[in-house]
Amino acid sequence: MTDITKKTTQKEEIELLQQEIDRLKQKCALLEKVVNEVPANIYVSDLEKGVIWCNKTNEESLGYTLGDILQMDAMEYMQKIVHPEDLNIPEDSIGHYRSFEGPEYGGLFRARHKDSKEYKWYMGWAKAFKREGNLVKEIICVDVDMSQQMSTDKQLTEALKENLKFKNKLLIGNLRKREIEILNLICQGKRTKAIADALFISTNTVSTHRKNIQKKLGTSSLADLVSLAKEAGLG
């Protein structure tokens, strides 16, 4: 092979390499634009350190830059943006992935921009993102602002009802078989004696079960107990 041929071949290889680099740059630019323009908050969370990366939408919708977030402790950021009553969602998500063996995690919660007093409803989903052996170290999360996605109040209301129904079903699932039997009869309007007669147990046993059921479900009155159970499909 002559020197001229060698130079021509090297030049062609360099040109092909440059073309491939240009294609990769274009691809990276497109992916970066998609990630930052998608109408959802996307972030990666280390199970120990908290959020370690987020897209531009997340920064704009909640008011904290990635630099701001990285200066906070693991749960400090969540405590600033998530409604106090919904902090169990990020906490449960972390607990879920620390012993992850089942389905991915999702939930409804309220969050707000740092300069706003009003909260918006978000639908959030998480997925295992980085593992070390069988242990999940990082998760990637996508939170969608439901106030922008829902075109009517009716849709939002129905979505929240479905979420509440699912949550209540999970609570009911923690009850024992006998407790579910008693709760189902309570929802049917049965009194303590009628329940005792139907199940061949004493009235004191029925009362004890009912107290335990209310404690497990976190209800303070019979009306709340019946409402929760019916929302979960009992009765």
Image: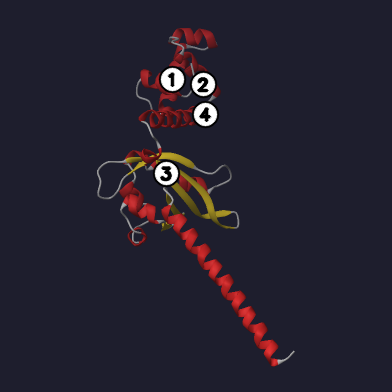
Q: What colour scheme has been applied to the protein in the rendered image?
A: secondary structure
Under mark 3, the amino acid is Val
Name the disc covering residue 144, or none. 3
> Could you say which is closer to the camera, residue 177 or residue 98?
98
Q: Position of residue 34 (x, y in %)?
A: 46, 55
Q: Which mark is residue 173?
A: 4
The numbered disc on residue 210 is 1
Front residue (pair 27, 118): 27
Identified by mark 4, the residue type is Gly
Query: Tags 4 and 1 in contact by the CB under 8 Å rule?
Result: no
Pair 1/3: label in front: 3
Q: Are marks 1 and 2 in contact (CB under 8 Å)?
A: no
Separation of residues labelled 3 and 4 (CA atoms): 28 Å
Q: Earlier in the sequence, mark 1 or mark 3?
A: 3
Mark earlier in primary sequence (4, 2)? 4
> Residue visible at 64% across and 79% down?
13
Please state which of the two labelled residues, at mark 3 or mark 2, is closer to the viewer.
3
Label 4 – label 1 distance at C-alpha: 16 Å
Number of labels in the image equals 4
Of marks 3 and 2, which one's residue comes earlier in the chain? Answer: 3
Which label is found at residue 148?
none
Residues packed near mark 2 inside 10 Å, few (<14), some (14 to 19) or many (20 plus): some
* Mark 2, residue position: 180
Q: Secondary structure at mark 1?
A: helix
SS at mark 4 in the image? loop
Q: Residue furthest right?
A: 1
- How much space separates mark 4 and mark 2, taking CA atoms? 9 Å
Instruction: Work out which quarter of the rendered image holds the N terminus and state it.
Output: bottom right
**Which amino acid, by three-letter code, is at mark 2?**
Ile
Q: Please, what is the three-letter code of the amino acid marked with disc 1?
A: Arg
